[in-house]
Image: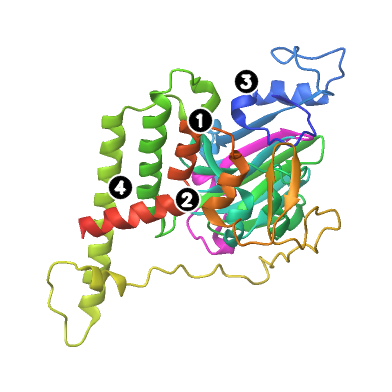
Amino acid sequence: MEPESKGAAPQFETECEYVNGTLQQFHHWIRSTSQNLPEPFDNFNNSDYWGYADYKYLSAIFHDRPEILQDIIWADFGFPGRDGKESTLWVGSSGANTPCHIDSYGCNLVLQVEGRKTWHLFPPEDTTYLYPTRIPYEESSIFSKVNVVHPDWCRFPLFSKARPYVVTLHPGQVLYVPRRWWHYVESIDDITVSINTWTELDSDHEARVEEAITRMVVCAFKSTDLSSNIKDWLNPTEGEVTSHETNLLYLNQALAMYTDREAKKVEDVQRTQDPPLKRNKLTTDTASNVDLSVSSPPFGKHLLPVMPSPPRSDLRGAGTDNIVFGGDHCRTLNSETTQAVSSQWHETASPNQSVTSDDVLECLVNPQVIHLVSRLLLKKMI
């Protein structure tokens, strides 16, 4: 549960109130008047709060009615064999939203069942402009610091360069979200119901290595910060802070899975060569020749491309290549100093401000840095 807000900060799950109830009780709360709110939602006026029952696996909800799971068929969109067993349910009230983020693993197919949702999508190339952060930490998500519908232009000037793809999903429509595409989602009707499935990709093997590195660094920094409250930095979906030993085990398992997978791919390639290649130890040169690309989804009569939205007229700073800020005021500079990781430094620090452990952590877990560390570790394993 979260109060409706038009502020400039994203509404993360760490700031939400949580209520244990049934979907039926939640439905009654959405439909109730302010004078007749059902328990356990009676402390939350539905005119002041929005609610989201998200990420509920259908296999758990309909464990006693498995035939229902077979009614969800993703084969028409290029994923044969997937049904409700690999799908999750999302039920929300008007205003319910997920902060802008990217999923660390796979790609996403979303079926809108009831009500409408508006999606704001951004391509991977816009990552710098969305100011990525790993706080709050969740293994499968990289969040944006920007409230993309009410941005703070002084704090996040590079967001003016982002290229949104905005689409409203109606009942019966399906949206394909490609790998590493940013997305902010908001319910615009009184009740919205969606079903989605995340499909695995070959690139997930390296992504698991990157996520294991990130978990290790975040937990190492935040666990030793006595002034840090776990509820402020650990997403509720994570449950608890894992130890350094456990995180190191995760990392080694992810590295082993990746190298085993790559070795098998090279063997498969060698097996098809004529004459066959010598099966020596996997080398960096051999591995670099393996095609790691992922084929495009089967666009056709079932999936049509979403086009980018036209430039917004209210983009403060649009057309200004370099904007930095200090204190409470914005100013422009004619220099090339607001790119990649440096853009996040301008967002968090001023000349008279001391560097904090969180500033260092933010630089260390920047997706570009984590990717580089992952590649260096993988070279050691090959």
Q: Quadrant of the N terminus?
A: top right
Quarter placement of the C terminus:
bottom left
Q: Can residue 334 be seen?
A: yes
Q: Looking at the image, is mark 3 or mark 2 earlier in the sequence?
A: 3
Tag 1–tag 2 contact (CB < 8 Å) = no
User: How far apart, in angstroms, are the residues tagged by discs 1 and 4?
Assistant: 21 Å
As drawn, 156 above or below 220: below
Q: Earlier in the sequence, mark 4 or mark 3?
A: 3
Which residue carries the number 3 mark?
Answer: 18
Q: Which residue is mark 4?
A: 254
From where the camera sits, is residue 151 visible? no
Q: Are marks 3 and 1 in contact (CB under 8 Å)?
A: no
Residue 156 located within the stretch drawn in magenta: no
Q: Amino acid at mark 4?
A: Ala
First in sequence, mark 4 or 2: give its number.
4
Of badges 4 and 2, the one in the foreground is: 2
The part of the chain drawn in magenta is 70-95
Amino acid type at image mark 1: Thr
The numbered mark at residue 367 is 2
